[in-house]
Every structure is written in structure tokens, then in C-alpha cells.
Image (cartoon, helix red, strand yellow):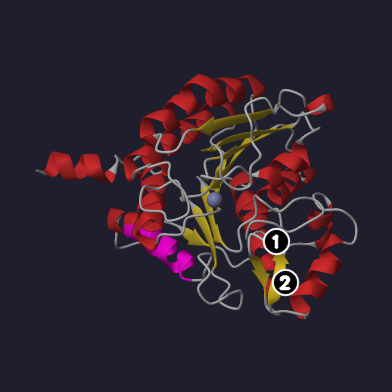
Amino acid sequence: MPVVAVVASPEHESEGHPERPERVPAAYGALTDVLARRDAATPTWRLLDPGPVHEDAIARCHVPGYADSLAAACARGPGLVDPAPTYVTPGSWAAAQRAAGAVCAVVDSVLDGARWGFALVRPPGHHAEPERPMGFCLLANAAIAARHAQARGVGRVAIVDFDVHHGNGTEAVFREDATVFYASIHQAGIYPGTGAARDRGAGAGLGTTLNVPLPPGAGDEALLAALDEHVLPALRAHDPELVLVSAGYDGHERDPLAWLRYTGAGFHAATTRLAQLAADHAEGRVALVLEGGYDLHGLAEGVAASVRALEGLPDASAEEASAR
Ligand SMILES: [Zn+2]
């Protein structure tokens, strides 16, 4: 049975900011629409009720003192901790701890045999660097979960990031680490400005970072070509025991923050490929972690497409076409 964790964090909010609490219910509604439709009589997914992340898990990815200084900044809030703008409120520290804890709990369930997992959480995580919050992100959720899995004995992990922005924070955590392969497909030339194709990691981790920047307007075909020609061959060579997906839906054609023009069909096809990677290499162990996605309809369509893919259902647009 799939597992889902939902952390909407209504106390982490700044009026008019695109990274807002309504994103999570929009995503969860889309997920339940897909799963409930399959068999209304019995529950088809398990909803987790996770607690806050353990401080040891934070310390695996962030520098000493990070948690204390971020907690203090939140307590002094509301205010900005990064010019993105990344805001905090007095409730943001608890929200960030719950979000990261939920991602770890989803990974725990996947390691314990759940068919797949989806952590619908905010604040997001992939821009948060070891020493600073950044880009609407406070804790490096996906990175923390990868390290959490490794603390449980998992060796090689793949993190695939299809958010429209480069996940500079996740990349920074694993830049010199050969055990966690970080692959990102993102729009070139936008925030945060990192993620050039030449950046392949460093030291022992040289070769286990892969960036595929795409030009504005690239669309589904470019996303799938990046996966098929670059990301998936590299990840198959890495032979991961767990596949984590930094699932941002701000590449959707409706999203106001960027312009990669993906559609639901693109997210469906991409997620299908990542689930297949997990099936072939990782005993099917795959967990998605919500990152960006700022148009509620685009976010809902993207999440629904990913969930349909994880369930082995056809793309919704294909289903509508066959029904005609
Ligand atoms: Zn993003």
C-alpha cells in the first residue's frame, strides 16, 4: 500500500507569497482523487502522522549550530532569512521540523515495504544549503531523508530533482559524496543560477552530480530526452537502492515562476520512468518529496499525473482521449 504524509504548515505563511499553505491541500486533493477512484470501498493508501525530524538527522546535512540559529530567527519572526524572499514566522521552525520529519517517515515506510511514498510537505527543501536557508527552503528535506535512509543501512541513493529550479542545497550536501547521486533537470538561467552541465561534483563525489539545464519553453519532450539520454543511464550505472524524487511542479505550463512548459503528460511519463528505475534497481523503493509548484491547478495536475504513474495508471489525458 502506498504511504502519504501531509504537512500543510498553515502557521508558515506570508501574505502574497507564492509558497503558501494552500499548495498542500491542492496537492493532496489531487492525490486522493486518483487513489479513491480506484476502489471507493476500502482505503488504498495509508496516511502517516509523523513527528518532527530528529536533531541528529538535521545535523547530517546542516552545519553545527544551524538548527539553533534558524530556530532563533523563526522565534524573532516574522521576517526574511534570505532575499529570495525566504520568510519565517514564529511557527516556521516547528513547520520545518515537521516537514523534514514527514519526509523521513515516508522513506521509513518505503524501506519497510510500502509500495511507494509521497511526502506532501512545506516549506520545501532543495534550495536549503548546509549553512543557510534559501529559496523558500529552511531544511534540506530530501537530503535529510537520504542520509536518514543511509543511517538505516541503505548504501547507494539516487535523488532526481525535476523541479524547474536547480536544487543547489541538495547538490551542496552531496557534492563530495559518491554514495548519493544527485541529478537535476531545470530551467537554465533562472534562480538560483547554479546547476551548470559542467558541475559534476567534486573529490570523491566527482561524477555523481548531474545537471541538465533546459532552455526556456523546452517542454515535455526535452524533459523526457534529458531523462532518457542523460539522467537514467547515469542512475542505472549508480545502481541505487532507494530512489528519491524532488518533485517540484513549477515546470508546469501554468506556473507563474518559470517557463519550461511541462504538462501533466510530461510529469506522468517522467514519473513512470523513475518508478521503473526504482523497480529495476531498488526493489521498487521510490519516494516523492514535494518541492515547488505555485499554480494550484498546475500543481494538482502534476501531482495527479505522478500518482497515476506510480499506480501504473495511464496518463489522464490519454484516458480522456480513449473515452471519446
Ligand atoms: Zn522550484
Is label 1's Cβ within 8 Å of ligand 1?
Answer: no
CA neighbours of label 2 inside 10 A, class few (<14), some (14 to 19), many (20+)? many
Taking the spot 71% from the left edge, 31% from the top edge, the residue there is 156
To which residue does mark 1 refer?
138
Q: Decide: marks 2, 1 in contact (CB < 8 A)? A: yes
As helix, strand or loop, the secondary structure at mark 1 comes to loop
Instruction: Give the residue displayed 34% in from the left and 43% down from the top.
Output: 263
Gap between marks 2 and 1 measured at Cα? 8 Å
Residue 36 badge: none
Q: Is residue 311 left or right of residue 204?
A: left
Q: Which residues are magenta?
A: 22-33
Residue with the mark numbered 2 = 93
In the rendered view, would you say 280 is above or below 165?
Answer: above
Residue 230, given in percent of the width and then of the height, sits at 54, 22
Q: Is residue 30 magenta-colored?
A: yes
Would residue 85 appear left or right of 81 to someone viewing this image?
left
Q: Mostly what secondary structure, the magenta segment?
A: helix
Q: Nearer the viewer, residue 174 or 304?
A: 174
Asked if residue 43 can be seen in this view, the reply is no
The residue at the point 9 percent across, 43 percent down is 324
Q: Secondary structure at mark 2?
A: helix
Residue 240: x %, y % from top left: 64, 30
Report the amino acid beneath label 1: Leu
Say which quarter of the image contains residue 223: top left
Name, please, the residue furthest toward the right: 64
Give the mark nearer the N terminus: 2 vs 1: 2
Q: Nearer the viewer, residue 228 or 304?
A: 228
As drawn, 71 above or below 239: below
